[in-house]
Amino acid sequence: MSGRIPSGFIDELLNRIDIVEVIERHVPLKKAGRDYKGLCPFHNEKTPSFTVSQTKQFYYCFGCGASGSAIGFLIDYAHMDFVDAVEDLATRVGMQVPMEAVARPGPDLSPLYDQLAAAQRYFSRALRQHPEAARAVDYLKRRGLSGEIAASFEIGFAPPGWDNLSTALGFSEAAQQQLLDAGLSVRGPRGVYDRFRDRIMFPIHDQRGRVVAFGGRIIDQGEPKYLNSPETAIFHKGRELYGLHHARKANPKLARLLVVEGYMDVVALAQFGITNAVATLGTATTRDHLERVFRQCDEIIFCFDGDAAGRRAAWRALEQVLPLLRDGRIVGFHFLPAGSDPDTLVRAEGPDAFRDPDRIVPLSEFLFSHLGDGVDLGSLDGRARLAELARPLCNRVPGGVYRSLLIEKLGELTRLDERQIETMFQTGHRRVPVRKPSVPGPSRRSPSLIRTVVALLLHNPRLALKVDDPSSLGDVAQPGMGLLMEMLELIRSHPDITGGGLIEHWRDTEYAPHVRKLLSLELTVPESGMEAEFDGAIARLRAQSGRRREGALVAAGAKPSELSESDKARLRAALRRPHERGE
Ligand SMILES: [Zn+2]
């Protein structure tokens, strides 16, 4: 959710507009049953998979997986930013976007930026002057960094000790609070202390060049090796890229960006004149990262280790980048030799190792070699299998040259002609059962039940009004439970909210892709059966939570006689339902 426009306004706006009218201005739609259908504007197709639901106030495409609310449509289709999309919609229905909300970005964050800037100056000064800094300087020298590069990346030193920074900057209570809000201090049982101690400090800048966070590397040995600032009001790991600000400064005309794994890699490459590298901050590459990169240039080269973990990370990056492959964009993969990272490779072989086109595997090649792994292309079955595996991925690529290229390549591999492939790609509407256990993780059972409940709520929000005591459903620490609780809460305070309205509450959060996906599922439960399905799922959740509680009580040594009446009631309820579906 954007911090600038109150979420209540967004709810009200999405209640007043009609997504069908919004989309119809751009995409011809036809009524089909309760929904509307048309040719998807996000991928190339000849039979309509693009569906707009008036009841859910949501669109989705079975072919490429595009989905969202009316706001999301304008962002993705018309390339508006969030505020523009909201303003556009508000104008259509004669609503005024709250002025003060647009002009003032919520709480005043400037003290936070000021504190982070002051911290950066403090760490830089400590690297030059602190009596303990010699080890840090030695380390940087050993890694081959010049003073010039260290200065240009504003690298610093957090001295050993618990309160260096808070003594230097926390001169008032307000200042202490800002240090906490900025993630520089931590509140522990024994008081407030500096988060970064005895570390080499890499400031992380936003696109405008303001320091928004830090990465701290341990000197020599210790754990964790890298420590990042936590998420704060101004720092979101899933969006910021280390080095982007420098890359833009060093290259007024950026043609390509290299995406590497660590900040040392970015700095080491810059030392060798490769000034166009950026790194994610201890997270996998997200779609937000990639969108940000593509706003700077048209070419991305991912540098990953050539080992199994590196290949997995590369595959995840590939999956994220497919929907962004518009014409003119280029994506390649540079798999580094075993045992080396960009830092060691550039030292061993010089910058040309990163400029040699022969080392770069084009996306199409990586895609088909990965899918074809273990598939026998000598047999007809194997070739059909490859085409089947490639379908959902190729369908995520918007129409145009890139998609044609992939289909051409697939044609060569499978010896099918391109028209056959296109036909095959477009007849793949599948109904996805609501309880399909596609959520991976250690305890698949409860997430899939939670997932069922969340999916039903998204499709029919008013079901939330039937839940009396949300806190009895389970523990917020269970995967997905936090989302479920928030959703129940939200619907209870906005009983008229639609699915499209709901998903806007999780825009820009880690849940966004999940809730969008759940809302685009076609439930196997008919409309009339939804309520019963929901009641059943809620009862099972309660029973599970009761059993979990019982387990915890027994583990803690409680005898049945020591259980409270409500615990006993929960236990009995749990025991009455021994044959639960799906367990
Ligand atoms: Zn589509």
Image: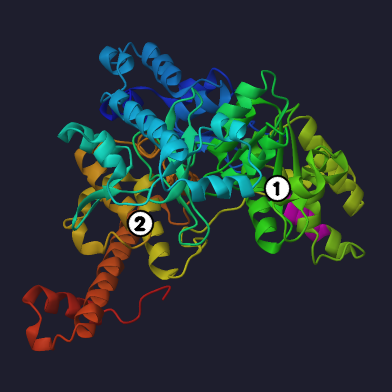
| Vertical arrangement, residue 581 with respect to residue 208, above or below | below
Q: Residue 574, percent across and down?
A: 24, 77
Where in the image, quadrant-wise, is ligand 1 located? top right
In-front residue for pair 379/365 = 365
Would you say residue 258 sits in the magenta stretch? no
| Vertical arrangement, residue 191 with respect to residue 180, above or below | below
Residue depicted at 38% across the width and 60% down the height: 479
What's the residue type where badge 2 is placed?
Val
In this picture, which residue range is highlighted in magenta? 384-392
Q: Quadrant of residue 79?
A: top right
Q: Main secondary structure of the magenta part?
A: helix
Residue under numbered circle 1: 342
* Crowding near the residue tagged with mark 1, few <14, some 14–19, many ≥20 C-alpha atoms within 10 Å: many
SS at circle 2: helix
Residue under numbered circle 2: 453
Q: Residue 25, percent across and down?
A: 54, 17
Residue 174 is tagged as none
Q: Quadrant of the C terminus?
A: bottom left
SS at circle 1: helix
Q: CA distance from mark 2 to mark 1?
A: 45 Å
What's the residue type where badge 1 is placed?
Pro
Residue depicted at 64% across the width and 45% down the height: 265
| Vertical arrangement, residue 258 with respect to residue 138, above or below | above
Q: Residue 112, percent across and down?
A: 31, 30
